[in-house]
Image (tube, helix red, strand yellow):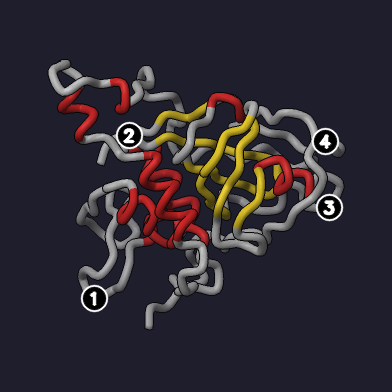
């Protein structure tokens, strides 16, 4: 049976509960509605700029120059469908959010494994080297760094820019790194429904954020990423 990475790895997924939906959400640097944090703003671990214009793989015709790129793109619909249909799969870790997202990307989205060191950002694998899984497969922050930098991921500036199959990463105020990951499975009038391995496996982005808005440990950052390259 697989074991979780050592404690020195990034912090585990935060609890996910529901609450009343509120106003539309601006992502990437989402500040809590409570008073500003007194601690220094954490520095990004990598360059989080948007990597070029987004293209919709479904719009590419077989005869167009974009058809080859479309065939090599990660399927957002496939990722979301696999996640939605496999919410009840067995948890392999006490905090299984990133592992669940990785399996959806692999089995549903067609994202290919990449070799490398277990802790390396450019690696993404399971069942290799005798270690079970890379940290980018099982850790929310390592997965965020991997899909952003190594899968040509595009960060969406607002919730209403998101599409089905995009990934959502959460950072709580008291944590140094992003520590929860989920998948967008629906978009209704600019509002995202998400699926995850969390306290509530099917919920909305607004519900998750508002659950912690007036607590001592609110969610202070939400980043939506659209990985592109398989």
Gap in angstroms between the C-alphas marked 3 and 2: 36 Å
Disc 2 residue crowd, few under 14, some 14–19, many 20+, Cα 10 Å: many
Q: Is residue 98 left or right of residue 104?
A: right
Gap in angstroms between the C-alphas marked 3 and 1: 41 Å
Q: Secondary structure at mark 2?
A: loop
* Quarter of the figure that contains the C terminus: top left
In primary-sequence order, the first of circles 1 and 2 is: 1
Q: Residue at 23% across / 50% down in the picture?
A: 112
Front label number (1 vs 2) = 2
Disc 1 residue crowd, few under 14, some 14–19, many 20+, Cα 10 Å: few
Position above or below: 83 against 59: below
Q: Which residue is mark 4?
A: 33
Q: Which residue is mark 3?
A: 216
Q: Secondary structure at mark 1?
A: loop
Quadrant of the image occupied by residue 22: top right
Q: Which residue is mark 2?
A: 228
Q: Which mark is residue 130?
A: 1
- Label 3 with label 2: CB-CB less than 8 Å: no
In primary-sequence order, the first of circles 3 and 2 is: 3
Gap in angstroms between the C-alphas marked 1 and 4: 45 Å
């Amino acid at each position: 049976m697989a074991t979780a990475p050592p404690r020195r790895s990034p912090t585990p997924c935060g609890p996910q509960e529901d609450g009343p939906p509120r106003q539309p959400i601006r992502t990437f640097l989402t500040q809590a509605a409570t008073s500003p944090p007194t601690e220094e703003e954490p520095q990004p671990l990598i360059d989080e700029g948007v990597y070029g214009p987004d293209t919709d793989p479904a719009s590419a015709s077989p005869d167009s120059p974009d058809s080859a790129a479309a065939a090599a793109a990660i399927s957002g619909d496939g990722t979301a469908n696999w996640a939605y249909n496999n919410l009840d799969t067995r948890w392999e870790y006490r905090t299984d959010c990133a592992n669940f997202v990785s399996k959806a990307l692999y089995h549903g989205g067609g994202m290919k494994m990449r070799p490398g060191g277990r802790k390396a950002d450019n690696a993404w694998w399971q069942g290799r080297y005798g270690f079970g899984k890379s940290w980018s497969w099982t850790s929310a922050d390592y997965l965020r760094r991997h899909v952003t930098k190594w899968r040509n991921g595009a960060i969406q500036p607002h919730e209403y820019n998101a599409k089905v199959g995009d990934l959502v990463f959460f950072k709580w105020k008291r944590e140094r790194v992003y520590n929860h990951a989920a998948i967008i499975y629906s978009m209704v009038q600019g509002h995202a429904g998400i699926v995850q391995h969390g306290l509530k496996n099917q919920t909305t982005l607004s519900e998750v954020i508002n659950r912690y808005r007036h607590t001592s440990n609110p969610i202070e950052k939400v980043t939506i990423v659209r990985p592109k390259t398989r």
